[in-house]
Image (cartoon, rainbow, N blue to C red):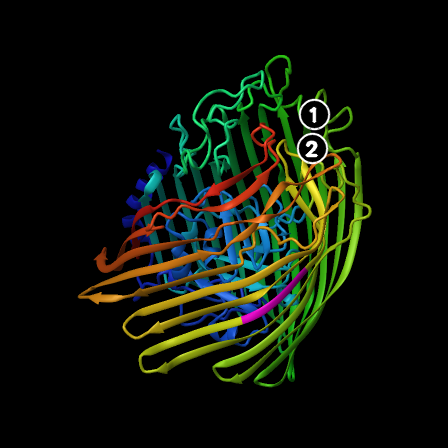
């Protein structure tokens, strides 16, 4: 009801907005404005597309062509293929070599995103080989928690608020690199201020009672200022439903504002963002029936409660009754930031980015599947806030451009969780738990200094060497111990065995990139990066808590890439433009601390080195007659050259959750019919087979030991269709466009799992090893109506 009230109010507000906004000659739809992050060392001076100085700008095709990095820009059209109720994370699935997994199909739920094996996010049990090796930024501001390395995907729930996604593979240029950029950087760019005023409001409704509304209002440039405010709200049910009718609902909302001001000699921007996504998380489901796993679980004596068996074969999209087992997950992330670009006369340009971000996670679980369990209730509610500043200068010199500077950030992270049962004989409470608990404070200071020289002896050649010095200071204190502890009086087990600890790390990161424009439309390029990051912390019984961190080292990512790019403008009379590219890559991630969360909240830790090698490719074409085509794909092999867990060597196994191949392609055609433009579109998505994690890969001296499985998740494919119609109208003396569309996702109703893992039997308490999975969404249909004014 809350979503419907907000939707009604916003649609009712459109006539009033038309009076407030200044009249203008031409509307600039938000999806057509540029966005994203190029080398932020460039002052945006505005352009004919409607972007004022200070607005973020995605790399143009010409900039991508001449870059020494592998870069893929997804515009609003390609991002929209994720569907009208998707979050920003789901749009990344369109990039070459990407894999996105989660437990839902809307922006309300959490996702893990992967790029050539470098991953980030929460959505599975763990065991990801390159976790936290992928940096995520929002309008240039880093979102990753410096301690855990992870970003809150559900805090970016409204895809319609974003105008582009810029994906940089590998460490990238030193001037653009952040702490977790070793495997790549993903920049989600929200709608930017424009020189002309305008706005959009779009409502969607479809399968599983899922509904969404998203809007943006742009002021246009007034006395050098240009502002935008955007927001969205959505909600609905999951595609999995329990026998009690519980449909695992979710809800999300987001709000964003940015204003820019140009002045003589530079520009300044101020921005703020708030995002929240929450949803019930259906359990993983056994792939095959097991007589010891029913939908009702076990009685207090440990006997199976008779009932239908819980498995995919018994009901592919079923979930457990809410009273037996339910999980509620919530992510909140917000930030405020300011960016300045100031010309220093003929010397160069000074740039500064100052920000503060705050994150709150909440995970509430009711566990009555094993009746009379001591861990009947769980609450996980960690918090994190980060303050940072990045200052650098770009200096143009004869035949070269030098960039030098650095950043400093300080974060405070509290990892907090506890399990309890209030009933006799346990008598636990949330503050005096009888089960496992933890509360620890991590303070981390990250410092980076860099110098980079873009050398160009001739216009067609750029060679960019760089050095980057990084320093990390980490300290930990256990807040669950002592007379003033947060869990004083607890009768359970503290997952942290130590009172505290600290560590300091530093390293030097060399990098080199080169680009040679062989022809005006063809460039060859290569790069090498070496990036370091701190091992992940925060899980139950992990580093600093139960595993001494004094002997740990920085994790190291070394990657080499080489490839070609093309950019044709009207090469033939019937082709308006073509962009293509392909590259080979070799990523080695060494000195890894690999974590997996077990049932009960404890962490299993392994040490290893992984190697990912493969080929990425992409293409875009605009053909006469309004036809647009795109293709993105990858072929990859992975291997742990070393992997040790529980004293057992698992070297040689594949890295879990990295598909052997990915492919997506699509075609659309804009057909003018009198004053209406009708656009039918079709696109295809394929994810190849991939290894999964098994927490019972072997039996060690202390019981089951987890490691990558020798088995695989089967590959899958989906076909999707949409039909869109745009027609102009005039209201209150202002030109507007009505946009109506119908989307059908997974048209053929394919049934597939996009995530699986092997359990030793503790998950359902039956002690029998079983393979569990998360299902992809069935056929889904959505209608959407929008107004661009």
What kind of element bears circle 1? loop
Q: Position of residue 253 (x, y in %)?
A: 44, 42
What kind of element bears circle 2? strand
Residue 274 seen in the figure: no
In front of the other: 592 or 515:
592
In front of the other: 246 or 361:
246
Crowdedness near tag 1: few (<14), some (14–19) or many (≥20) residues, C-alpha within 10 Å: many
Q: In this image, 529 relative to 34: left or right?
A: right
By secondary structure, the bulk of the magenta-drawn segment is best described as: strand
Dot label at residue 487 = 1
Question: Which numbered disc flags the more N-terminal residue, 1 or 2?
Answer: 2
The reply to whether callout 1 and callout 2 are in contact (CB within 8 Å) is: yes
Which residue position holds label 2?
439
> Residue extending furthest top?
424
Q: Residue at x 31, y 79 (%)?
A: 574
> Residue extending furthest right?
550
Q: Residue at x 30, y 40 (%)?
A: 8
Q: In this image, 616 relative to 573: left or right?
A: right
Q: Position of residue 9 (x, y in %)?
A: 32, 41
Q: Residue at x 61, y 42 (%)?
A: 694
Provide the residue span drawn in magenta.
Answer: 583-588
In magenta segment, residue 452: no
Residue 622 seen in the figure: yes
Q: Is residue 291 above or below residue 121?
A: above
Instruction: Please identify the quadrant where the N terminus is shown.
Output: top left
Q: Is residue 39 above or below residue 570?
A: above
């Amino acid at each position: 009801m809350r979503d419907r009230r907000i939707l009604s109010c916003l649609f009712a507000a459109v006539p009033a907005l038309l009076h407030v906004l200044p009249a203008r000659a031409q509307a600039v739809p938000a999806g057509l404005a540029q966005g994203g992050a190029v080398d932020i060392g460039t002052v945006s001076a505005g352009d004919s597309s409607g972007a004022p100085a200070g607005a973020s700008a995605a790399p143009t095709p010409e900039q991508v062509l001449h870059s020494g990095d592998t870069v893929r820009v997804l515009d609003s059209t390609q991002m929209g293929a994720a569907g009208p109720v998707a979050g920003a994370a789901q749009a990344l699935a369109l990039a070459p070599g990407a894999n996105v997994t989660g437990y839902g199909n809307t922006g309300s739920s959490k996702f893990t995103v992967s790029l050539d094996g470098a991953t980030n996010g929460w959505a599975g049990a763990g065991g990801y080989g390159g976790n936290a090796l992928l940096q995520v930024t929002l309008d240039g501001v880093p979102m990753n928690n410096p301690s855990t390395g992870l970003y809150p995907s559900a805090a970016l729930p409204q895809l319609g608020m974003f105008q582009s996604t810029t994906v940089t593979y590998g460490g990238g240029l030193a001037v653009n690199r952040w702490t977790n950029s070793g495997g790549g950087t993903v920049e989600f760019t929200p709608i930017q201020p424009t020189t002309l005023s305008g706005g959009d409001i779009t409502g969607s409704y479809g399968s599983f009672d899922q509904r969404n509304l998203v809007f943006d209002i742009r002021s246009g440039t007034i006395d050098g200022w240009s502002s935008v405010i955007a927001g969205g709200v959505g909600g609905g049910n999951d595609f999995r439903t329990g026998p009690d009718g519980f449909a695992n609902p979710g809800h999300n909302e987001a709000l964003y504002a940015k204003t820019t001001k140009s002045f003589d000699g530079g520009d300044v921007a101020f921005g703020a963002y708030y995002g929240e996504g929450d949803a019930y998380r259906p359990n993983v489901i056994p792939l095959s029936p097991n007589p010891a796993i029913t939908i009702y679980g076990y009685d207090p004596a440990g006997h199976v409660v008779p009932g239908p068996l819980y498995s995919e074969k018994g009901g592919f999209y079923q979930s457990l009754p809410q009273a037996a087992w339910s999980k509620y997950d919530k992510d909140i992330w917000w930030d405020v930031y300011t960016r300045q670009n100031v010309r220093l006369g003929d010397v160069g340009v000074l740039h500064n980015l100052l920000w503060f971000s705050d994150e709150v996670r909440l995970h509430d679980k009711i566990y009555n599947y094993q009746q009379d369990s001591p861990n009947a209730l769980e609450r996980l509610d960690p918090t994190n806030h980060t303050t940072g500043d990045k200052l650098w200068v770009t200096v143009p010199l004869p035949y070269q451009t030098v960039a030098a500077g650095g950043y400093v950030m300080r974060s405070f992270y509290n990892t907090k969780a506890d399990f309890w049962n209030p009933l006799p004989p346990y008598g636990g409470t949330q503050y005096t738990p009888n089960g496992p608990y933890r509360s620890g404070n991590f303070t981390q200071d990250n410092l980076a200094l860099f110098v980079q020289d873009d050398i160009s002896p001739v216009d067609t050649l750029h060679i960019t060497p760089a050095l980057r010095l990084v320093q990390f200071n980490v300290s930990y204190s256990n807040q669950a111990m002592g007379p003033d502890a947060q869990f004083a009086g607890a009768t359970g087990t503290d997952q942290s065995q130590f009172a505290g600890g600290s560590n300091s790390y530093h390293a030097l990161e060399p990098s080199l990139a080169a680009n040679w424009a062989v022809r005006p439309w063809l460039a060859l390029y290569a790069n090498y990066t070496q990036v370091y990051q701190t091992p992940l912390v925060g899980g139950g019984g992990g580093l600093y808590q139960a595993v001494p961190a004094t002997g740990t080292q920085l994790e190291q990512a070394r990657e080499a890439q080489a490839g070609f790019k093309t950019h044709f403008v009207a090469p033939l009379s019937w082709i308006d433009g073509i962009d293509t590219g392909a590259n080979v890559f070799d990523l080695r991630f060494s000195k890894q601390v690999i974590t997996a969360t077990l049932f009960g909240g404890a962490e299993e830790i392994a040490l290893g080195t992984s190697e990912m090698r493969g080929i990425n490719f992409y293409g875009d074409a605009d053909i006469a007659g309004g036809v647009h085509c795109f293709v993105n794909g990858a072929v990859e092999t992975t291997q742990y050259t070393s992997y040790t867990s529980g004293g057992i060597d698992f070297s040689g196994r594949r890295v879990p959750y990295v598909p052997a191949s990915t492919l997506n392609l699509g075609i659309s055609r804009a057909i003018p019919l009198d004053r209406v433009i009708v656009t039918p579109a079709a696109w295809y998505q394929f994810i190849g087979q991939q290894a999964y994690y098994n927490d019972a890969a072997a039996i060690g001296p202390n019981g089951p030991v987890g490691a990558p499985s020798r088995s695989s998740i089967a590959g899958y494919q989906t076909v999707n269709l949409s039909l869109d119609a745009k027609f102009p109208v005039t209201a209150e003396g202002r030109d507007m466009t009505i946009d109506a569309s119908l989307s059908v996702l997974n048209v053929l109703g394919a049934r597939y799992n996009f995530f699986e893992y092997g359990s030793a039997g503790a998950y359902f308490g039956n002690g029998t090893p079983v393979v569990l999975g998360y299902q992809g969404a069935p056929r889904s249909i959505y209608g959407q109506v929008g107004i661009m004014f």
